[in-house]
Image (cartoon, grey):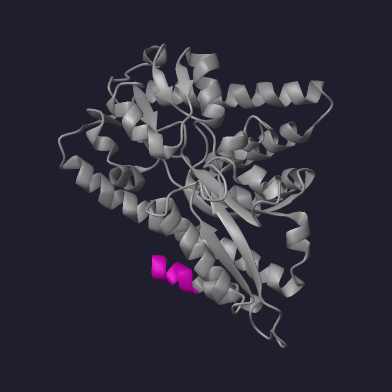
């Protein structure tokens, strides 16, 4: 399936490299990333995307990746690009929700869409265009380059009802951190992935969300707490973007821009398939370990989804009161696509 889809997508984007004519002058971008060079993120998202860029541009554009902390700290890719420290950045909008709440929607949303639904909204429902509109106000151009599937929680406590979240010290980020605080009376804290294991193992936190099974196994989080709670309904799908300054983007020839867009779209589809396959293998490994895997009850998942939608509506109303309709347009677009999908695809056990 993965090979077939990759081949089909390469065929669809072939126009981007066909008939190139005279070669363009070579351009090199310095890319700052949020992960270590041993991370799944770096090796399964960043490097394959770079390879697609070089393949589809015929080497006219090359990208030099730098792991977290070399050019900028893990969560500072946006600032590094804006400040000219890096030509490009690779990060999820999850970490800039405090700059604009719409980033919480673009990063995936508590109780929100699955990876396949998210791909549909981004590419066919206007999501990526809205993201680009937001980044343009910040002097940047953006492309989706990857989407991660549902995360899992590593926990020292069982969570059987929404009230069990109250008071929990929870490693969280983005809109989810706000929702934990405002709707569930939990105590969220945000730290980079490199600090999650130690914090969880030493009981500095009760529960940690960091990533999906494939990445968490590599980090060893199954050894830091006795329970795995799945799925992590706070994040059913979470996109990553490539951001560059508008000046850097506009300096590319038009044909190279089209090649970069094609490489980004191809990498996004490939990463979803690869990530899901890795997670299946990782869950098999976790199932045979000493950690106890516990399903998250529907009552908790439903409460998270309800709180996520309430948070989004409240933020849209807040921005409208301040004279901006952008958050409202993002929220309406996102949930309209989500509700539309549910109306034609949802089934129940009784049907």
Q: Residue at x 22, y 47 (%)?
A: 284
Q: Residue at x 57, y 65 (%)?
A: 63
Q: Position of residue 42 (x, y in %)?
A: 44, 55
Residue 300 image-quadrant placement: top left
Residue 2 is inside the magenta segment: yes
Q: Position of residue 341 (x, y in %)?
A: 56, 43
**Residue situated in front as seen by the camera: 201 or 184:** 201
Q: Is residue 47 above or below residue 181?
A: below
**Residue situated in front as seen by the camera: 146 or 220:** 220
Location of the N terminus (image quadrant): bottom left
Could one spot residue 230 in this view of the protein?
no
Residue located farthest toward the front when viewing the structure as drawn? 70
Q: Is residue 21 above or below residue 122?
A: below
Give the residues drawn in magenta, as a range. 1-7
Residue located farthest toward the right when viewing the structure as drawn? 323
**Residue situated in front as seen by the camera: 316 or 136:** 136
Residue 55 image-quadrant placement: bottom right
Q: How many marks?
A: 0
Q: Is residue 205 left or right of residue 77?
A: left
Residue 202 image-quadrant placement: top left
Q: Is residue 19 above or below residue 302?
A: below
Residue 126 is inside the magenta segment: no
Q: Position of residue 315 (x, y in %)?
A: 68, 24
Q: Position of residue 68 (x, y in %)?
A: 49, 47
Q: Main secondary structure of the magenta part?
A: helix
């Amino acid at each position: 399936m993965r090979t077939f889809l990759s081949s089909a997508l390469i065929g669809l984007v072939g126009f981007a490299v066909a008939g190139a004519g005279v070669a363009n002058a070579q351009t090199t971008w310095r890319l700052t990333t949020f992960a270590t060079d041993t991370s799944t993120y770096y090796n399964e998202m960043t490097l394959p995307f770079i390879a697609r860029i070089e393949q589809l541009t015929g080497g006219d554009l090359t990208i030099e990746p730098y792991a977290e902390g070399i050019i900028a700290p893990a969560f500072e890719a946006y600032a590094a690009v804006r400040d000219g420290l890096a030509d490009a950045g690779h990060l999820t909008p999850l970490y800039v929700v405090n700059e604009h709440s719409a980033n919480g929607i673009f990063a995936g949303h508590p109780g929100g869409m699955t990876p396949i639904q998210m791909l549909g909204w981004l590419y066919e429902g206007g999501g990526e265009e809205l993201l680009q509109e937001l980044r343009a106000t910040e002097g940047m151009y953006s492309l989706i380059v990857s989407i991660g599937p549902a995360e899992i929680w590593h926990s020292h406590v069982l969570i059987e009802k929404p009230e069990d979240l109250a008071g929990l010290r929870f490693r969280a980020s983005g809109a989810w951190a706000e929702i934990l605080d405002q709707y569930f009376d939990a105590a969220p804290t945000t730290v980079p992935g490199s600090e999650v294991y130690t914090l969880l193992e030493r009981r500095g936190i009760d529960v940690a969300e960091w990533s999906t099974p494939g990445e968490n196994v590599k980090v060893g989080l199954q050894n830091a707490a006795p329970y795995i709670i799945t799925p992590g309904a706070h994040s059913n799908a979470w996109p990553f973007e490539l951001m560059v300054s508008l000046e850097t983007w506009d300096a590319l020839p038009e044909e190279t821009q089209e090649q970069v867009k094609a490489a980004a779209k191809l990498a996004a589809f490939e990463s979803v398939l690869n990530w899901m396959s890795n997670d299946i293998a990782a869950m098999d490994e976790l199932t045979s370990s000493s950690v106890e895997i516990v399903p998250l009850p529907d009552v908790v998942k439903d409460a998270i989804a309800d709180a996520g939608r309430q948070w989004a509506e409240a933020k849209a109303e807040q921005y409208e009161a301040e004279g901006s309709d952008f958050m409202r347009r993002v929220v309406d677009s996102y949930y309209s696509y989500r509700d539309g999908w549910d109306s034609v695809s949802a089934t129940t056990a009784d049907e």
